Amino acid sequence: MLVLGTSGAIVLSADPRKYEKVMYFYSLLKGMEATQNNTFARIGLAWDDINALQRKIRRKGLTHRDREHIAELLGDISLLEAILTYIRKTLSGLDEELPVFLPGLSEEERHLLDILEVDDVLSEIRLRIDDAFFVLEDLEKEVTGLSTLASTLHEGELRRVFSALRDNTAHSVAIGYALEMLEALIFGVYFIELLNFVIIYSGGERWLIEHKIFGIPDGAVLVLLTGVVTIIIAWRLIKFMHENTYNRFKEKFA
C-alpha cells in the first residue's frame, strides 16, 4: 500500500526496507519542491512590496522607513538567491549520482519510481528553478533601481538641508554683526551721556563752548571723538568676548 503526502510518501509492505532508498530519494525531491514553492511565494510577496512602495513614494515621498524597507528587500533577494543556488547545486549533484543510483535499484523500486512520477517531479523542479532565477533577476533590478532612486532623493534632501543651513548661518552672522554694532552704539551713547554729566557738574561747560577748533566748539569735538573711540573700543571688546565664548563652546563639544 502506498500513501502519498505533500513532503513524501509512506509504503506499507511486509518488507518496507527494500523501498527505503526510493523513499529517501522521493522525500528529497518533495523537500526541494516545497522549498522552491516557498521561494516563489516570497518572490511574489517581494513584488507586491515593491509595487506598494513605489506607489507610496510617488504619493508621499521618501521616508527613512522606506529606505530601511528597500535595504530589507535587498537582503531578502540575497537570501532567496542563496536558496535557489543551493537547490540548483543539489540538482547538479543528483545528475551526477543518478547514473549510479538508478541501475542499482530493483525492479520493484523502479516500478515505485514510475508510480511516484519521479522523472516528472525532477523535470518540473529544474524548469521552475530556471524560471525563479529569471524572475529574481528582474526583481533585483527593480529593487536596485528603487535603491538608486532613494539614494538620489536622499542626496537631494541633504543638499536642500545644507543649503538652508548655509543661508540661515549667513543670516545669523549678519544679525550678529548688527547686534554687536548696536551694542557698541548703545555703550557709546551711555559713555557720552556720562561725559556730558561730568562736564556739566565740573563747571567746564562754558569753557568748552567758548573755545573752538575750526569754528566748532571744543565740547562738540570732544563728545564726537569720545563717542567714536568709545564705539570702536566697545565693538572690538564685544567681538572678542563673542569669539572667546564660541571657541570655548567648540572645544567643549568638539
Image: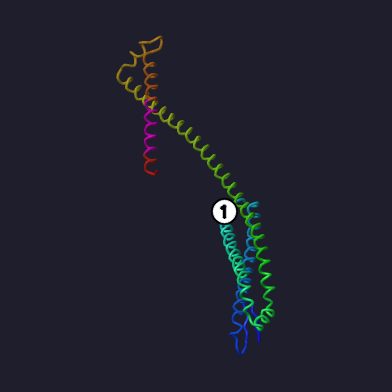
Instruction: Say whether residue 150 is left or right of residue 192.
Output: right
Residue 153 lies, in percent from the top left, at: 59, 47
Residue 207 highlighted magenta (yes or no):
no
Above or below, 179 relative to 123: above
Assign a secondary structure to mark 1. Answer: helix
Majority secondary structure in the magenta region: helix
* Residue assigned mark 1: 67
Q: Quadrant of residue 161?
A: top right
Which residue is at 69% across, 80% downward?
Answer: 115
Residue 218 lies, in percent from the top left, at: 36, 14
Residue 56 lies, in percent from the top left, at: 64, 55
In front of the other: 57 or 111 = 111
Q: Which residues are magenta?
A: 233-247
Which residue is at 38% across, 37% downward?
Answer: 247
Q: Quadrant of residue 229?
A: top left
Please name the amino acid that badge 1 sits on: Arg
